[in-house]
Image: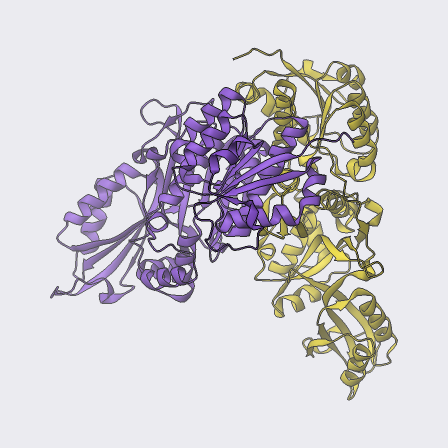
Chain colours: A yellow, B purple
Amino acid sequence: MIEYRNVRVALLGGGTVGAQVARLLLEHADEFAARVGASLELTGIAVRNLDAPRSADLPKELFTTDAESLILGADIVIEVMGGIEPARSYILQAINSGADVVTANKALLATHGTELFAAAEQVGAQVYYEAAVAGAIPIIRPLRDSLAGDRVKRILGIVNGTTNFILDMMDTDGASLEHALAVATELGYAEADPTADIDGYDAAQKASLLASLAFHTNVPLESVHREGIRGVTSQTVELARKAGYVVKLLAICERLTDLVTGEEGVSTRVYPALISRDHPLAAVHKANNAVFVEAEAAGSLMFYGAGAGGPETASAVLGDLVSAARRHVIGGPGMGESTHANMAILPMSFVTTRYHVTLSVLDEPGVLASVAGVFKDHGVSVELVEQGLYGNGGGVHGESRPTATLVIGTHAALESDLAATVSALAQLDAVSSVVSVLRVEGA
Amino acid sequence: MIEYRNVRVALLGGGTVGAQVARLLLEHADEFAARVGASLELTGIAVRNLDAPRSADLPKELFTTDAESLILGADIVIEVMGGIEPARSYILQAINSGADVVTANKALLATHGTELFAAAEQVGAQVYYEAAVAGAIPIIRPLRDSLAGDRVKRILGIVNGTTNFILDMMDTDGASLEHALAVATELGYAEADPTADIDGYDAAQKASLLASLAFHTNVPLESVHREGIRGVTSQTVELARKAGYVVKLLAICERLTDLVTGEEGVSTRVYPALISRDHPLAAVHKANNAVFVEAEAAGSLMFYGAGAGGPETASAVLGDLVSAARRHVIGGPGMGESTHANMAILPMSFVTTRYHVTLSVLDEPGVLASVAGVFKDHGVSVELVEQGLYGNGGGVHGESRPTATLVIGTHAALESDLAATVSALAQLDAVSSVVSVLRVEGA
């Protein structure tokens, strides 16, 4: 066997993921060398604060605050510091100095991916990012390589562990959103400011990456329709359960017909949706992630596992590191973007799904008829109606007349027709409030 | 963009998979060209009988009986004819003429993989085989690349769709094995001679491939411990259900301690086992496949989808074809074996699991004490005992004394101790018969 020189690896970031990457790299040095065909030399770990506590016991001399010098001498740069700057500048520096890059930074890729991939392509460097979506779950490579001979039709992903933990706890324990969020925060699943998770920003970043990869086209983050879970109440979850559904925050990437041109386009969206309890995604509990892929020839596939966590994310980072290091030793392609398709990005109004609309209505004769009339006027066909499940549960405080809850399930309808229907419903005298509008996915 | 000449693709086999590969390749020629960066030219389809019916409408002029001439002119040879010969000779011819090979032939790889990979390595050719395990489910690449920076501890796979269909039908409908097999045959899931599926030969071939890949070592097919599902009765399945389990035929690949040397070795085995109904594998219904992977850093991952079928297997073949074709255009490594670890292959007697032993016993005082004594004598600790679930259900015809069914669940115990226990139990006067011995997996 030919002896190669060491592959020099610089690590940017010594947080939860970084410390685990360094630990595993040092602990299993022999296995890495055997798998790559050359030793992987960890040349240093760039951090902001040398004295910060670390989640693994690592040699002090590896730490430095001088990221730029570290990058200069590296064959491969691993970026696990997170955030946009200075991560972006460091990655560009690494690419321009001829290094390959492994990153777990979904926020950066979703906002500056095009710039980074273009810079990499110009110098023949590679950017690997398996860890950026769904933590340890291999999803980038399967989409990019294994399904490269197939046509992905739709992806339904549970890609945010925090919100899945919260919704799962609301479903299994009947907890309120506030209580479940407090537990998630206490257990370290949610950040002090949970906005990125709760409002769907994190899921939208991952949806943008998944859609770009699955459809070989560029799906900008701004084009992802995003709704978070703040509006999901324990009543919503309980009504869903009674109807045989579970509420999940889904990242959805779908080939759809452009209603204007008639051509095929891409719809990418994030919202809490109803999933049948028979669907494999319904069984994804706690903070786990899963990506359900429907492809033309392969049929339905699901990839399931831990979506976050230090060692879990480190596993994905290190898998990329081995690929990058093998490329240094024996050559080969990396994980670059494939955006040849140039598909149209479709607006939310082109989406067709089924809906469950929950209304708080006056408990009076004729209410059902006037509600049903609104659906009929907008061409939305009603599949089921459930009334009075909660008696006065949906009532408005200070409202003197008795109210009832009305759940209307529709057949597949166009989003724009449904939006118009919901506006009209809100205007009805008989409707106290539109409690929730949830789409049904996974059919 | 640089213009490359066509990549010439020869297809060996025009059966269920071959016809779908050809159809998709012709139908989506533009997408393939865009993904590869060069056109893929299907130069011909080698078949035994030019007039056999095909599952897709394909141009007559593509078919030939002259496989050898077809191989000579090809950059990439796809082998989906199955069987050992002439597939083996054709693949060797392809490798020696400098072509890369894509194959779905698990039987060939499990028996002659070492020979084929060695031949490929000698000339720098590549052998791709994603379709050989679990049909459309991407499992080869995730194990080989995504988890290359992690240490796989254990794999539990449902890798045979036919037996899963049968066991699932026995579980959900209470069907007998014979009836479920008859339905599977009628639906085309089982072959006229179901031995390869029912007796675990097919699963053993896949287990050998998965273990070799996951542990970077060579696990010969002969070393795989194999038990089929013929002994699984509807009573077994019902007892399992009452105890909170489901019976699944599992392919298990596990790192274990060698009880002689104290070093780490590999155990690879196939048998029907009990899985808790809470385990993700318990939710794998019908003819679906799933591979559950436990890795040191990544934790638990599951890959789920269709394990067989023409278009599904074609999807995996075409994914490999795109990888192989990209390698022709831009270079890079293939899917070769990684067998640097040279781990010891451990015998079944080194395996530790929990067991459920079902006995038909005489319904007399003192029986439980003598049965319990046998477990105690062999150092096997008993966790639970359930008696009389079936009354005389387990009775032996012509036996005059009344019998009862006794299920004994053990704590984790060594296979060799359990085997000695079961032998001793069979000798007891009070035991009419050992109805079943099932291992509990997935803890």
Q: Quadrant of the C terminus of chain B?
A: top left
Please identify the residue farthest to the front as the structure is shown: B61
User: Which residue occupies 62% across, 11% down?
Assistant: A5
Q: Considering only vertical position in the picture, is B66 above or below A385?
A: above
Quadrant hosting residue A362: bottom right
Q: Is residue A56 visible?
A: no
Horizontal and vertical percent position of residue A389: 67, 76
From this viewpoint, which residue is outermost toward the bottom?
A365
- Whether residue A375 sits left or right of residue A38 in the image: it is right
Of residues A65 and A415, the one nearer the viewer is A415
Residue B81 falls in which quadrant of the image? Answer: top left
User: Looking at this view, is A366 or A234 the one in front?
Assistant: A366
Taking depth in this image into account, of A242 and A96 the one nearest to the observer is A96
The reply, left or right, for residue B338 in relation to residue A42 is: left
> Considering only vertical position in the picture, is A427 above or below A221?
below
Decide: is A286 above or below A436: above
> Of residues B109 and B73, which is closer to you in this image?
B73
Q: Image quadrant for the N terminus of chain B?
A: top right
The percent position of residue B78, horizontal first and vertical second, equals 53, 38
- Which residue shows up at 84% across the image and 58% down it? A261
